[in-house]
Each structure stands twice: as structure tokens, then as C-alpha cells.
Image (tube, coloured by chain):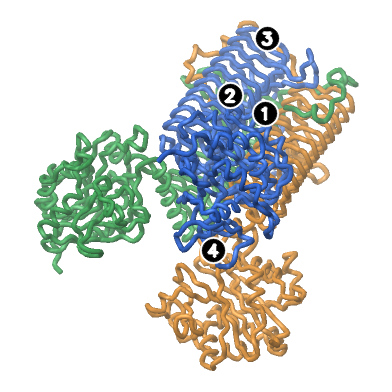
Chain colours: A orange, B green, C blue
Amino acid sequence: MKKKHSSFGVMILAAGQGKRMRSNLPKVLHEIGGKPLLYHVLSAVGAAKQGVDVSQVPVAIVVGHQREAVEKFVQEDPVLSLMDITFVHQPEQRGTGHAARFAMDSEWGEQRVKEKAAVLVLPGDLPLISPSLIEQMSSPLGRGDALKLLTCDLPDPTGYGRVVRRGKQGSVMRIVEEKDATMREKAIREVALSIYLFDAAFLQVGLRKISNKNSQAEYYLTDLISQAAARRKKINVLKWADHEDLRGVNDPWELALAGRILNERVLRSWAMKGVLFVDPWTVRIDSSVILSEGVVLHPGVILTGTTEIAAGSELGPNVVLKNVQVGQGVKIKAGTVAEDSVIGAQTQVGPYAHLRPDSKVGSRAKIGNFVELKKAVIGDGSSVAHLSYLGDAEVGRNVNIGCGFVTCNYDGRVINGQRKHKTIIEDEVFMGSDCQAVAPVRIGKGAFVASGSTITRDVPSGDLAIARSKQVNKTGYAARFRPAPSTPKESKGE
Amino acid sequence: MKKKHSSFGVMILAAGQGKRMRSNLPKVLHEIGGKPLLYHVLSAVGAAKQGVDVSQVPVAIVVGHQREAVEKFVQEDPVLSLMDITFVHQPEQRGTGHAARFAMDSEWGEQRVKEKAAVLVLPGDLPLISPSLIEQMSSPLGRGDALKLLTCDLPDPTGYGRVVRRGKQGSVMRIVEEKDATMREKAIREVALSIYLFDAAFLQVGLRKISNKNSQAEYYLTDLISQAAARRKKINVLKWADHEDLRGVNDPWELALAGRILNERVLRSWAMKGVLFVDPWTVRIDSSVILSEGVVLHPGVILTGTTEIAAGSELGPNVVLKNVQVGQGVKIKAGTVAEDSVIGAQTQVGPYAHLRPDSKVGSRAKIGNFVELKKAVIGDGSSVAHLSYLGDAEVGRNVNIGCGFVTCNYDGRVINGQRKHKTIIEDEVFMGSDCQAVAPVRIGKGAFVASGSTITRDVPSGDLAIARSKQVNKTGYAARFRPAPSTPKESKGE
Amino acid sequence: MKKKHSSFGVMILAAGQGKRMRSNLPKVLHEIGGKPLLYHVLSAVGAAKQGVDVSQVPVAIVVGHQREAVEKFVQEDPVLSLMDITFVHQPEQRGTGHAARFAMDSEWGEQRVKEKAAVLVLPGDLPLISPSLIEQMSSPLGRGDALKLLTCDLPDPTGYGRVVRRGKQGSVMRIVEEKDATMREKAIREVALSIYLFDAAFLQVGLRKISNKNSQAEYYLTDLISQAAARRKKINVLKWADHEDLRGVNDPWELALAGRILNERVLRSWAMKGVLFVDPWTVRIDSSVILSEGVVLHPGVILTGTTEIAAGSELGPNVVLKNVQVGQGVKIKAGTVAEDSVIGAQTQVGPYAHLRPDSKVGSRAKIGNFVELKKAVIGDGSSVAHLSYLGDAEVGRNVNIGCGFVTCNYDGRVINGQRKHKTIIEDEVFMGSDCQAVAPVRIGKGAFVASGSTITRDVPSGDLAIARSKQVNKTGYAARFRPAPSTPKESKGE
């Protein structure tokens, strides 16, 4: 059969506020899997194999509520900004038909009509639609056909437009919105999901004819079905089997449900590539995260943003990483939190380490429990094993930092316009426990700092630095400071 | 139709031990959503719209096993103690009919008979029954009717009394307990859930006639159905559609299941009011907690007791709050644990901060990682950003506390009868890192404490306090303290 | 009926690599519930009541891919090593029939034939089969019968061999593998799970006759069904109702699913014994862990290895224990991580304590927040309440360790061949806050160490040790160190 349409466009309806979201954010900017709903829809369009260069499929996004925010997001996203996207402004939201009319009456719509294009209409709030659905919907209409319609049998069709057919499995006559449906129509389980492929000319003309005489006083895109039926046009139907793909988002609970499905898809896909999950039902991974074969993820792990984990690394329970690069064979223990950081191969981190932005840990290093890094570079083979804070610090290789070390990067002074000052610790330094470095300060290569020292001046390479008082034992004095023998209960510190 | 009963009472059966709970606690005091099972039942009674003042519905609770504990709980609960509750003592537990007889033969029961009241009988271990169920059950009986019965079709009716009807959907003849049921009766999926509305006089008289000739040698309330059927009384039935509302609790696993359903109801209800959950299936929120629009809760959050979170606040993964007041726009990061505390607006807390009871953090403040507060007041705009312990402390406004600060609130001495002493840090103090304040001690307004100082005496306002040794660098001495060059592996601290 | 077989053997097929696991580990060594798949299968065999001493049931395990690893695991497991296990080497993996043939042609197989034994064949990757299934499968075959076959109706039979019967519920004719099945056969929901009981002689002879003329060019054990049918042998069938028992593991996702079911079984079984779970769906417990009545486990708890928790102990959210012995009435608070350690009765630990291997905490003790122990013994009634590190330490009874204490167990020196040195703190010592003990060092009984002291020499019993500088307040000097008044935002430390 000869294809009618050589040309193809996509219209995405993204103007709604989504009042039930109870939020100022426009509905399509609410996120699942770390990305707005609209991103997922556009991304499915982009991933569909339509036999053409994706960047050349003309897409119109109808925007309205907080349109600046929607446009800004699309324009700034590194992937979406490559697509051929036109924004159409719908000043008031008066129904899907009203939205589509603005698009078809715009220059973008005129161009589609001129090209005799088919136009795929997608709601911006169906984030789980797949590239495969888009491929199947966008297969060309037959000659003279007006439209194709996507339907699905739902276990609970409440709230959706029902598909009224001529007889049980006969041709489609019309779509009835929930609020306009009779009891009998409400019992129909086959619903329309506001996904259509239209002949552009039919769509443009038809939209000018629809009325808002219904219980909501809105213009419904579904009226075009009746128009086509009245004109005895063939109404093609694609009935989709997996209703989870078509889950819409209208309130925060539905947002969470869609997020769960997306998350399980992401996790399952990683499992098939050799990632081991001890308990995937407690793990969250953004679709933007990249994992490798042999990675092991314990319960409660949360990975977001541009995080990448190299082969053979293991993340303990409740590890939370955002934009973190993790090398091969790394072990990150329970509860470690890191952001905008890099961790080298074969390094151990945690439990309960905290890597704040711009931290960079080398390979074969160790960052232990209750250690905080901030803008800190830790060299290969170095160890910061316990209860320390390194901020604005550069630590060389094979350095050993004892327990309780603190970089005093801020003491209120402003030097050369900077409020935070730098601590530099060169290779092979041995820093005893409970030391502080009052920045700006440099500890030279191979220096040794005695436990309990407050370092305020540079330490030359190879020196021993010490800044503490001599111990005095006052014989028998303990009794003066001790209360009468306490019960075990009382003796516990609080 | 003229209503027969102008009066109405509620009888709750709460005498059982619940042996399968494997616990000394009486069954109805086991908790879900932070409250005992009995609380949830009474709370549904209280919330039902019965057209009368709830505090005036006479409620009888039949108690037995550890009745003192049950009575104490009800009497001390601030909400329940407002209800008109009478306790009836059932000395031994010999079945539901036996329990109800004690109530009907008591003064409470006599009063209901005198008032020609209808009596709603509820088991104390059905914590998911809704106010709406109670409303529908308590609609008055028709003139001359003896009772109304609640039934439900269960997917798995094992263990429940089956409803035996005349024919398939005919009138109810009797209820057969599991252990007395024939194979054919066991196949019936419609069960009775021990929820009844009785004419008080019928109930009182009927209970005196029932026998315990059955496999368990117990008196069953269900025998009244047979009595009514034998006397050709009409047996009204309310068949309830949602069997989850009727989930009973007989062992710790069923307790957990009921808790999960309650939790999901609570979360969903908050979602509909604009609370965003990234992954509600890992979050637990007591029904007593109060949230606001725009609150964002990450996975693993647990909120209990009287916790309240104001608008726009965000709680990171695994934050655990008990009785904590959180102001607007607060950000609480991963793993923070707080109890009986207050956190002011726009403040940041965590990750891994620990606020012990009686901590009060002002607004625009910062409590950072690995910081412990106990009976500590932190003023507006102040910062305790790293690895510190403040106990029995008062910190003013715009104070900066460096890393590793410790209030030595206890050194064994008893002063004026107190074992714990107070540290007072006035406004705008700058406390360097790794300082200690040996309480009782006061640091005056705007004072500056040098890093590494142990403060044992008061510091006057505006002074610089310093208590540390001068640094000495011993040239070339490091080698004396260092081992032969170690491999990277060996150089790691443990 | 006279039993034909007085003797019984078990053959387990464990040679496969499991390519879809995307891992070098042999498939049967992948773990759920802390043990390899093969362990669970052997353990079910061991637990089945076969009226004989389990250690005397002859078991053959057919090994191939990385057989050394499989054999090593079985031989070193303390339980499995007691069983009568023979390994049979299948050099290449060419199907189940090929594997079984190696076993039956081995000395082990010859012995079974000689004994006229029945041989139960089990796949090594069905970790959820129950002892009861094995009991029912191993009930003897009738005289002259060739085999018994386990089948199950699956909701989704994709991938499994379908059971083709004569008529709808007629006798079994053959099993058709997915890849060789017609469309009609694919619609059959009854599948064979590769669990069979064979007459040993029939099995040995039959295996020599099967061919690999099928789409996979493999030898299928299922061909023996056709052989039996052709010889008009009776094909006994055990149809198993609970298809979850028969869940196979072929990829990491199925591994996670099987792990979830096993975990829920373990938790439910503990709940029935009186363990209270607030939210079992977020808790993970290895099948090797032992709990007690009245134990309370909050969400996110993970217990592995040989962990045992005594009665009445409560574990807060996200507590992670591996090989830890916990006494009665212990309270372990949120996020505590412990390994290879012992915690005495009535002790409190956490939140966010970290007990590294070989830590031993006495009874009525307290280990508080952000405290790390490593090879540390803490005596009864002692307290280490805040932000401390004790490594290679022995602490006596009723000792109070202040906040910020550090054992400097490693300073680079090697003494007597040791790099880590010991700190000994005797009974009733009072250690002030922010002290360090430079090991090796001993603090004598009842000694008092002043806050802020670095202890480098032994402290005799009863002495007061002090090693700190005198505080100096420099009047009005603070202004020299303070910047111009900062805005609240700026004053926050980072």
C-alpha cells in the first residue's frame, strides 16, 4: 500500500497547570526518575525509530501555565535542545481541542498542512509511553484516512474517555468523557488516552468546528472522532496491551506510582546487564545514571544525576550519590552521602562518609567513618579513616591523616578577598590524631605532625611539628574531681 | 420509614489476649501507625457522622486480659478520654457471646435496653474500619427488626465464620465458625466479621440463651443470627465491598499487614493534599503527624508522634523524626535523627545530625554533619556545621561554631545538686575548631576563641581566648618517627 | 501397595554457567538470603523427612562450569559437608540429559542401579523448593513404574517445557521445550520443572538413547517422558499448587525476585514466633540469623550471617548487623553498623555507631553517636557516648569516656613487630572530652584525665592527668580577628 504521508510531526499538549498536583510547578515539569514528565515524552519521541533523523521531526509543544519555565527547561536540556521544537502559546486552558487548535492555526500547523503531514498528538503527562508505542502510532495512515486512535482496556476506567463502538468489537463511533457518559457508557473498559495520529488538514479544519457544549464547557479533541465517524471516514485504532505504559499523572500519588514503574524498568534493565541488586524494591536510580557489569547495590541505595559506577564496585545500604563518578572495584559502605565528586579505583569509602561538592579521592585510598570532605583532593593511597573534616584541602599521595583532623578553613579573616583558606598536605605526610591545620597552611612532604597539635605555621618537608603541652600526672588528685561512687546507671554520660 | 431507635450505643470487644501475638501486651494495645488497635476503632467511632455529639455516644469496652493496661491507655489518651466510655470486666474469655453478655447484663446494658437503643458491636482488633462503615452500620433498624449483620466476600475466607444463606443470594440463616463448618460450608466466601447492630432488648435476652456446645466450647455471638432466623425475624445485611477495611489482627504478621495498609492510606491522603513522595513505599508516617503542601519526602523517611512539617520543607532519605516541629523551607538531609525538638524556618540540618530531646534550633541556622545536640538552644543564623556535641548549651544568634567543638557538660562533679552543667555562648561569638568548653562556662558576646583551646573560665565579651601550645618544628625529626617506606596498602590507617 | 524402591538417591544438576547472570560466578553459587542457590536446594533435601538419616542419602552433584568453586563451597560448608555428596564432572554443558547421563554412567549411578534405587533429579537453580515438595516427590514409585514428574500451572509459562497430555486432563505424553513448541503447545500453562523421580535402571538406559536433534542441539532429560510413554509405562505426575516454590533463577532480576520471596518467608516465620516488624517489606534477614520473642525490628534493618538477637531487644531503622551477638533488652538505634562483634544485655548503641570486627561491649553500657570501635573491649556499665574512636583498646567497667576521645593506635612506629598498639583503660576511669591516648599506654584504675589532654605516658591509678595549656583571655582582641559584621548567610560555616 502506498503511504499517504511522506511527512510527520508531533504535537505535545503541555499547557495545563495540573491543579490536583497542588503545586505551582507546571504539571509537565514534575519529575520522575530525576527528569520532568515532559522530558520522558520527548525522549520517547526521540528514541522512536521513524526512519528519519530525530532532530528533524518537527515537534510543537503547546504551552500555557508557566510557559516560560517549560520553555526554559526544554531549551536548556542538552538532549532536548537538539530537537526541532516549536512552542505554541495557548493563553487560556479550555480543553485539548482548544490547545490543539492553537498549534494547528500557528505557522507550525500551517506548515504541516502544506506538507500533507500526519500529526501525532501526545499528552505531556504520560511519561511511560515507549518509543515502540510511538513507532506503531506513527506508521502512516491509509489514503483518505483521517485519523488513528490509541485505546486500551483498563481494569478501572474511571475518569477516562470511553470508546463507544458500533456493537461490541465494531468500529469506533465516538469517545465520551467521564462526565458526559451514561451509566452504560461508564461500564465500558476500553478508553481513549488522548494519543492520536491525524491527517494535518483534517485536524486543522476539524478543530475549527468543535464546540464546548458539554458539562465542562471545554473543547475536546475527542470530538474529531465523531466528526470523522459522521463523515464515514475510517477510524483506525491501535489497541495497546500494556496499560502501565499509559499511566497518566494527575496528582502527587499518581506521580509516585509512575515513578515506581519507571524505576523498576530502569533497575530491571540494569539487572539484565549484570548489575546485582540485593533488594531492588528499596533502590532508586535515575534514568540518567550509568552502571556497569558486576556492580552490586545493597538495599536503600539512591543514585541520581550523572552518577556513573564502574565495574565491580559495591555500594552498601543507603548510599546516596548525586553526580558522582566511581571507579572500578570501589567499596562504598553504608550510609555514605556524596555529591559532585569523584572516587578513584579500588578506594574504600564509609560507612557514613560525606563527600560534599568538588571532592576528588584518588585510587587505593580510604575515607572512613564520619569523615567530611568539601572541595578536597585526596591523593592515591592516602587515608582519612576517622571523624575528620577536610575543606578546601589538597592532600598528596600516601598521606596518613589520623582521627579527628580538622582543616580550619575559615576563621573569619578575609585574605585577598577570600573567606575560606587552603590547607596543603604534601605526599607521605603523617598527621597524628586530633590535629588542626589553621589555613592557609602547608605541611611539607614527609613531615610528621604529633597528635593533638594545632598547626598554625607551615611545616617544612621532613620536619616533626608539635604543638602541645607536656603531660602532668598529679598523684592521687583524681579523687578531688570525682563524685561519690555512682551507680552504673548514673555513670553513663549523656 | 419511621426509625425505631432514637438511641444508640457501641460495644467494643477488647478482652482477648491474642495468644498468637506471642506477647504479654493485650492484643488491642499492639500498635499500627503509632497508635494501639483499639485507638483506631474508637477513633473511627468518634469520626463517624451520627448526627449526635460524639462525646455523648455511650461506649462500652469489654476488657479482660490485662484490663488495667487497656483502661489506663483509654483514660490517658487526650482524645479518647473525652468520649463517654464505660469499661465492663469479663473475668474469663469464653467467646464473643460470653463477652457481650457481660456488657448487656451490666448497668450500661440495662440502660441501653431501657432506652430501646440499638447497640453496635465491634471487635477491638479491626483497626482499619472506617467512619463510613460505622455510619452505614448504625443507620437505624426497621421496626421490629432484631439485628443487622456486616458481611464481606473474602478471597480467602479461611478462619472466618461463613454466612449460610437460604439459596445462593437468599436471606441469612446462620453463621458457621470455621471449626464447625462442613466442607461445603467452608467453600462459602461470604463471611461475617463480628460487626453487628442489635436491638438492645433482643441482644440482652438472646445472649442468655446461647450455649457453648461446639468444638471450641465457647459462646458465640453468631448464635444470635440463628435465634433471629428461628423466630423469623428479618436479618438485615450490610455487605461491604472493600475487604481491606475488615482486615483483622491475630499475629505479628497480620499486624504488619494492617500497618502497611493504614500507612498507605495516610500517605495517599497527604499526597492528595500536595505532599510529594519520591518513593512512598519506603516511607512511614504516623496518623498523628501533620504535613503541609509542598513538603517533599525522600525514601526511607519515618515520621512519628506529634511531628509537624511546615510548607516547602524537604526531608532527605532516611530522616527519622519523633515529636519534632519543623518550620517552613527547612532542609533536613539524609539520615538525620531528631526527637522532641524544634527546627526553625529556612534552617539546614544534616546529613547525619542527631537532635536529642529538648533541642531548639532557630531560623536560618545550620546544623551540619555528625553534630549532636542535647538540651541545646541554637539561635537564629548560627552555625554548628561539623562533628560537634552541644549538650546543656545555650547558643545565641549569628554564632559560628567550628568543627569538633565539645561542651564538657559532665566531668563527674556535682554543683548545686546538678551533675550536668551549662555552657552559654552569646551572640556573634566565633568559636574556632577543636575547642572544648568545660561547663559551667560563659563565652561573652562577640568573643573569639582560637582553634584548639580548652575553655575552662568565662570569656568576657569581645575578648580573644586562647589555650594552646606554641608550634615547634623540629628540623628533620620526622624520620625518627616514621617506619621504613610503607606500601600504599600498609599506609592505610585502620 | 508394596514399595518397589527401598533405596533412594538425589541428583542435582549444577554444571551450568548461567550466561544470563552476566557474571563469572557459576550460577548455583549466586546467593539469596546470604547463601548460594545450591545451598538452599541441598538444605531442602537435608530437611525433608525421608525416614532415613539425611547424612546417608547419597547425593550426586553434576558440576561443570567452575566446578572447583562449587565443590569447594560444598566441602567447606559446615552443614553440607556432613551430607553424603559425590561430585560428577560434566566437561561440556550439552543439556540436562547430557548432564544426567554423566551421573548415571558414573560409579555413583552404577551403585544406584545396583540398589534398584529411585533417583530424584533436581535442578540446582530452584532455591525455593521446600522439604515438603521433596518428601512428596520422593515417595516410592509403583512396581514397574518408570518415573514421576513434577508439573505446575504457571500464569506465564513462557520459557518452560510444556506438558502435553492425551486430552485435557489425560495422561502425560511428552514435554515440549519452548523453542520446539507449536503455537498450540505454547498456550499450555502446565509446565514441567525439571524435577523427576526415576527408576535408576530406566534412567541409565534411557539416557543412552536420547538424541540432540532439536533446535538447540541439546540432550533433554524430558525425552525420557516420551520414551516412557512410547513403552506404555505409567507416567506419575505430582502437580504442585504453589508456583512460587518453583521459581527458577536465570538472570539477576530473577535472583532478586527469588530473594524477595525467601526473605518474606523468613520474616513471616519470625513474626509467627513473636518478632515484631514495623515494616517488614524494607527488612532483610538471612536465613542463618536467629531472633527471639519480643524482638522489635524497625524499617530498613539488615541482619546477616551468624547474627543472633536475644529477647526484648529493639533495633532502630537501618541498623546493619553482620555476625553480631546481641544480648537481651539491648537498644540499637538508627543506622548503627556492626560486624563480628558482641553487645551485652541492656546496653544502648547508636545512633550511627560503628562496631568494626572484634568489638565486645559489656552489659548496661552505652556506645553513642558517631563512635567507632575496632578490636575494642568495653566493660560493663561503661560509656563512650559521643564522637570517639577506640581501636585496639581495652576499657574496664564503669568507665566514662568523654566526647572526642581518640586512641592513637598507629603512629607509624613498629614496636615488637606490631604497627598497631594497645590502649588500656582500667575500671572507673574518667576520661574528659577531646583527649587522645597515644598507644601503647595504660590509664590506671579510677584515674581522671582532664579534657583536652594528649596522654602519651601511663597514668597511675587514682592520678589526675592533665596535658593542656592555660587559658589566656586577651581583652578586646576579638575584633582583630573578626571580619566586618557579616550577614547571617555569610556567617554560616561550610
Label 1 and label 3: CA atoms lie apart by 22 Å
| CB-based contact (under 8 Å), mark 4 and mark 1 | no
Image quarter in which the N terminus of chain C is found: top left
Amino acid at the residue labelled 2: Val
Disc 1 packing (10 Å; few <14; some 14–19; many ≥20): many
For the residue carrying disc 4, how many other residues have a C-alpha within 10 Å: few (<14), some (14-19), or many (20+)? Answer: some
Against A392, residue C254 (above or below) is: below
Residue at the outermost bottom position: A231
The residue tagged 3 is A473
As drawn, B274 above or below A461: below
Secondary structure at badge 2 equals: strand
Q: Secondary structure at mark 1?
A: loop
Residue in the image at 45% along x and 81% along y: A168
Mark 4, secondary structure of its residue? loop
Q: Are marks 4 and 1 on the same chain?
A: no
Name the residue located 67 percent from the left edge and 31 percent from the top edge.
Answer: B404
Is circle 2 on the same chain as circle 4?
A: no
Alpha-carbon distance for marks 2 and 1? 19 Å
Q: Between tags 2 and 1, which lies in front? A: 2
Q: Nearer the viewer, mark 4 or mark 1?
A: 4
Residue type for callout 4? Ser
The chain carrying label 2 is: C
Q: Residues within 10 Å of mark 2 (few under 14, many from 20)?
A: many
Type of the residue with mark 3: Asn
**Residue type, numbered disc 1:** Cys
Q: Going 15% across and 69% down the picture, which residue do you hit?
A: B1
CA gap between label 2 and label 4 equals 47 Å
Which mark is drawn over residue C384?
A: 2
